[in-house]
Image (spheres, grey):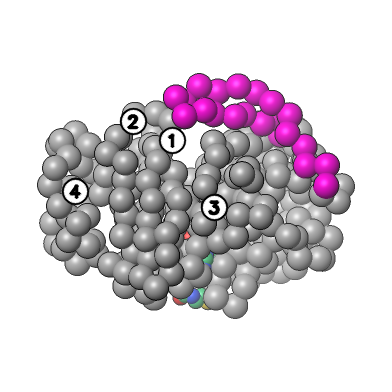
Amino acid sequence: MNPIHYAIQDWHQVPAELDWLTPVEQRRADGFRFEKRRRDWLLGRWTAKIALLGITGLSHRNIARIEIASAPDGAPQPVLDGERCGVEVSLSHSNKRAFATVSQGTGALGCDIELVEPRSPAFIETYFTAAEAERIQRVGPGDRDTLVTMIWSAKESTLKALRTGLQADTRSVEVIDDGVIRDSGWNTARTTAARAGAFSCLWRRDGQFVLSFVTRAPIETPRSVTGAVGIGQPLRDPVYRQIDSSGACRKSKLPFPNFPG
Ligand SMILES: CC(C)(COP(=O)(O)OP(=O)(O)OC[C@H]1O[C@@H](n2cnc3c(N)ncnc32)[C@H](O)[C@@H]1OP(=O)(O)O)[C@@H](O)C(=O)NCCC(=O)NCCS
């Protein structure tokens, strides 16, 4: 199985000095009309680059060599020193927090972060399948908002992996969880997309958020990449943490020696 690396970053962790962007990205950052969109875009780029440092084994001082370009359909496309990288990237932002996943050799990859909040029966009726609505009927009231958010998030992850986004009917993707909702650690699920087959899904609570991601290949426990960085502070080398299915965490160094350094 191929490892998935992921990063979670908040807006306050994005360095104010934008020297971590490539010149192309700096021009793009200058071109946004709306400040919120610019911030989301910057936060997504920063977080995806942190995750890419994890999978490539590059240190933080190389961060401006990485560009997160956009494909014509809006999907992120990683570039290193001007050349397309052979890795998949997906990113998502919500309420000043971003989640980015990176994999090598897993094929389609999609991720999403969503704030857990109450959603109406009309929302479920409009966007969810009958089987999903029935599953929500069976969950206890304490887990309802988490489950609804997870199902929505896993649909978005799947639609990103398929590169269609929300142009597709959200009911064309069905989310089947394994019936266990842990307070911490990763939960397993799978998604099936009409005429596009099945995906493996992992999801978890992260404070007030739900994170999810999907790939075609079976997913091993993902590896978290964190950067102890803040605005104006010097960038330090990343710390790699592996979190097992019980939520336990151990530190490790996981360089990818086959990647150009
Ligand atoms: C893709 C989509 C589901 C994202 O959902 P969202 O809740 O708005 O936002 P999220 O924060 O979860 O994800 C946004 C990220 O998804 C990625 N993304 C955008 N389009 C994508 C696609 N077609 N496939 C995969 N990923 C995509 C981008 O990286 C984007 O962040 P960025 O623009 O800052 O790079 C939504 O934007 C959508 O359905 N778009 C429709 C597709 C579309 O209109 N494409 C034309 C773009 S020019």
User: Tag 1's secondary structure?
Assistant: loop
Residue identifier under label 1: 186
Which amino acid type is marked by label 2? Arg
Question: Is the Cβ of the residue at disc 3 closer than 8 Å to that at disc 2?
Answer: no
Q: Residue at x 59, y 29 (%)?
A: 242
Give the camera-side residue of 51 and 199.
199
Q: Can you tell which quarter of the image residue 209 is in?
A: top left
Judged by depth in the image, the label closer to the viewer, 2 or 4, is 4
Label 1 vs label 3: CA separation? 17 Å
Label 2 vs label 4: CA separation? 16 Å
Q: Can you tell which quarter of the image residue 31 is in?
A: bottom right
Residue identifier under label 3: 217
Question: Is the Cβ of the residue at disc 1 closer than 8 Å to that at disc 2?
Answer: yes
Residue identifier under label 2: 182
Which amino acid type is marked by label 4? Arg
User: Left of 125 or right of it: where is 158?
Assistant: right
Residue identifier under label 4: 135
Dot 3, how many residues are within 10 Å of its Cα: few (below 14), some (14-19), or many (20+)? some
Question: Is the Cβ of the residue at disc 1 closer than 8 Å to that at disc 4?
Answer: no
Bounds of the magenta span?
238-258
